[in-house]
Amino acid sequence: MAGTGARWQAPLRMATMISLGFLLASVFVSAERSLKDEASRSNDTEVSLSNYLHKVANFLWQSDVSGYQHVWPDMKFGWQIVLGTIIGFFGAAFGSVGGVGGGGIFVPMLTLIIGFDAKSSTAISKCMIMGAAGSTVYYNLKLRHPTLDMPIIDYDLALLFQPMLMLGISIGVAFNVIFADWMVTVLLIVLFIGTSTKAFFRGVDTWKKETILKKEAARRLESNGSGNEEVEYKPLSSGPGNGPEKATKEYKEPEAPILKNVYWKELGLLVFVWVAFLVLQIVKNHTTTCSISYWILNLLQIPVSCGVSLYEAVSLYNGRRVIASNGDAGTNWKVHQLILYCCCGILAGVVGGLLGLGGGFILGPLFLELGIPPQVSSATATFAMTFSSSMSVVEYYLLKRFPVPYALYFVAVATIAAFIGQHVVRRLIIVLGRASLIIFILSFTIFVSAISLGGVGISNMIYKIEKHEYMGFENLCKYEA
């Protein structure tokens, strides 16, 4: 009973914090409404104070969105909010487990069911991804690698890919403006179906390997005269084809204090990249598109991202650092391998920025192809995605792209869903002895995203064809955010 109580302490604390957040939000809303109602009855001093507080409330809740044509439905209880909550909950749960975020499910839900315009849907989707990713990272910070003495988050892997991912996102956002919608839709469908299929077959291979290990364990029990005993879960030390597996006498979910699982030097470098990109993006948003300062700010992103990734790549090449979660394959690196992986990080960011999604849709399958265990792949991809999604949220907030009450609500839904999803799937992995469940969830989430986003894109494409609208390339320099 004590163990059960300890396991539920963290969820209860999180639920309490979220409840306090909603209480604080309601206080702000009530204050804003009371300011509007009492402004006409107050004296000069009270009016001055009321106006000041009203301006503060407007800033916090993004009430003033002049210059931006948005569609923000009223926040009221109805079938739309109920259905949207259910879809958002399962999207966040599956997306966090697979390490892809769930943006491919959030955006269509917010657009088609809740009724937001496309830009607002993308902004709120980023908020939900940030909430789910933050919850997942908090959960994973307590876990250790299934077979090695290291955190489940591979910081060296994140340090190699995350700066390139952030650079690629900036490039992808520019391509999103230039490319026609039908080009983005076709790329999304082809890429997502391809990656989901590849991930599915990877899951099948891992499932077969786990089945062989379970049969071998059952035969050993029978030879010892204990055939009626339950076969313990023997976690795979790596992906299929990476050599012999390490057997454990009895598997338990490895946990450690959060501070022990944080590598401060690597985390500091990742935070430096995040802050540098955020400052450059904020300053760039206040410059004229295609001006000299605009291009200078864009080019300054290259030394920041390449400098950090180059430091990690050189350290890996010289043997000072290793991708420990990759086993023996993570100790001997060639120059062409490191260049290829950095290019893959940029590609993941380009695709994420182009499609308006998190880079986890590319990083997750890519990490699996590198032989990273499914648990580590999901945790590391989500960790890297936390930085990119949070940067986008700050940018969208400053641009007043989303209503704060709606964003807070769906962030709470995604946060709780991600935590529950992680807990349930980890328990299923232990009970069933199938880490391949993570790969199948990844494949399923990407496939559903391809269907949902592809369907929305095709319907928009048909609408434009019927209206004889222009469907070619756009001019980046004439784009208005």
Image (cartoon, rainbow, N blue to C red):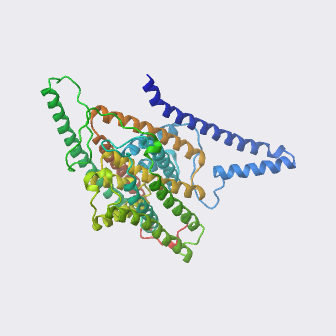
Which of 103 and 319 lies nearest the eye of the viewer? 319
344, above or below 412, in the image: below
Q: Quadrant of residue 224?
A: top left
Whether residue 226 can be seen here: yes
Q: Nearer the viewer, residue 343 or 5?
A: 5
- Counting from the top left corner in percent of width and height, residue 423 is at 40, 36
Residue at point 68% right, 39% down?
27
Tell me if 126 is positioned left or right of 184 in this view. right
| Corner quadrant of residue 175 | bottom left
- Whole-percent x and y of residue 214? 20, 35
Compared with 20, 99 (above or below) is below
Horizontally, is 17 left or right of 186 in the view?
Answer: right
Residue furthest bottom as drawn = 292
Q: Nearer the viewer, residue 437 or 4?
A: 4
**Residue drawn at point x = 59 percent, y = 49 percent:** 403
Residue 468 visible, this orientation: no
